[in-house]
Image (cartoon, helix red, strand yellow):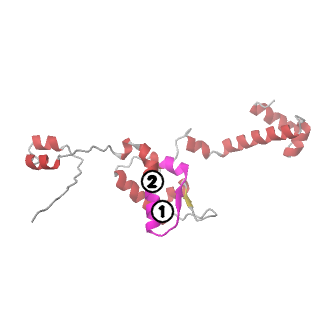
């Protein structure tokens, strides 16, 4: 009887050190060590997390027949900040939990979007760091400021620079318009 066997083994230990110290059989080490592949932990290759997270989310949504799912950019950034001590297996488990347990509303079509809020309900994600792109995207103050600047510029454009008419269009006082123009550096 002839048998052809391929064996893939993984360990976190340095087997060469274990052989030298007598904790691992030398003959077995040389039989196993035909092709050695070193893969760094997930925390050292955070650039892989978005693709892996999307893959696992889609896989588990299909497996549990939950339809299409997507991860928001903010959720992806939060996942990339996690330390993942359990590596890829921990990420996969987290994505399955997020897909199965998160009460995610459908967004018009068949695709459900898992955002940071939903992700936080099923796993312990770290909030965005102050000053990060994700934190700025969640800032009501910044969004309001940008919206006000845009509306003031549009109103001034429509009224050909007439501040009184622009204030009327914006439904604010002339004085409030002048104050905001000064605050935002709009001339």
**Pointer 1: what residue?**
99
x then y, percent, for residue 32: 16, 49
Relative to residue 56, is residue 161 drawn left or right? right
Q: Quadrant of the N terminus?
A: bottom left
- Label 2 vs 1, first from the N-terminus: 2
Left or right side of 56 for 27: left
Q: Can residue 181 be spotted in the picture? A: yes
Nearest the camera: 87 or 125?
87
Q: Determine contact: label 2, label 1, CB under 8 Å.
A: no
Is residue 98 covered in magenta?
no
Q: Quadrant of the C terminus?
A: top right
Gap in angstroms between the C-alphas marked 2 and 1:
11 Å
Taking 101 as reference, is 148 left or right? right
Q: Main secondary structure of the magenta part?
A: helix
Going 13% across and 49% down the picture, which residue do you hit? 31
Instruction: Indicate whether residue 66 is drawn in magenta.
Output: yes
Residue 169, quarter of picture:
top right
Residue at image point 34% right, 52% down: 86
Is residue 126 in view from this perspective?
A: no
Range covered by the magenta-colored residues: 54-78
Q: Position of residue 44 (x, y in %)?
A: 37, 41
Q: How many numbered discs, if any?
A: 2
Q: Which residue is mark 2?
A: 53
């Amino acid at each position: 009887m002839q048998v052809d066997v391929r064996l893939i083994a993984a360990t976190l230990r340095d087997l060469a050190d274990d052989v030298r110290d007598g904790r691992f059989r030398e003959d077995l080490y040389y039989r196993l060590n035909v092709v050695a592949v070193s893969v760094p932990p997930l925390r050292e290759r955070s650039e892989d997390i978005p693709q892996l997270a999307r893959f696992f989310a889609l896989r588990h949504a299909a497996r549990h027949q939950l339809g299409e799912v997507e991860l928001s950019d903010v959720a992806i950034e939060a996942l990339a900040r996690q330390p993942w001590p359990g590596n890829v297996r921990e990420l996969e488990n987290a994505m399955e939990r997020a897909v199965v347990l998160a009460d995610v509303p459908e967004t018009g079509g068949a695709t459900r979007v898992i955002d940071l809020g939903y992700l936080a309900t099923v796993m312990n994600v770290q909030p965005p760091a102050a000053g990060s792109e994700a934190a700025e995207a969640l800032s009501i103050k910044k969004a309001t400021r940008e919206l006000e600047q845009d509306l003031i510029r549009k109103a001034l454009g429509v009224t050909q620079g007439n501040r009184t008419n622009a204030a009327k269009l914006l439904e604010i006082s002339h004085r409030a318009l002048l104050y905001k123009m000064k605050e935002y550096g709009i001339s």
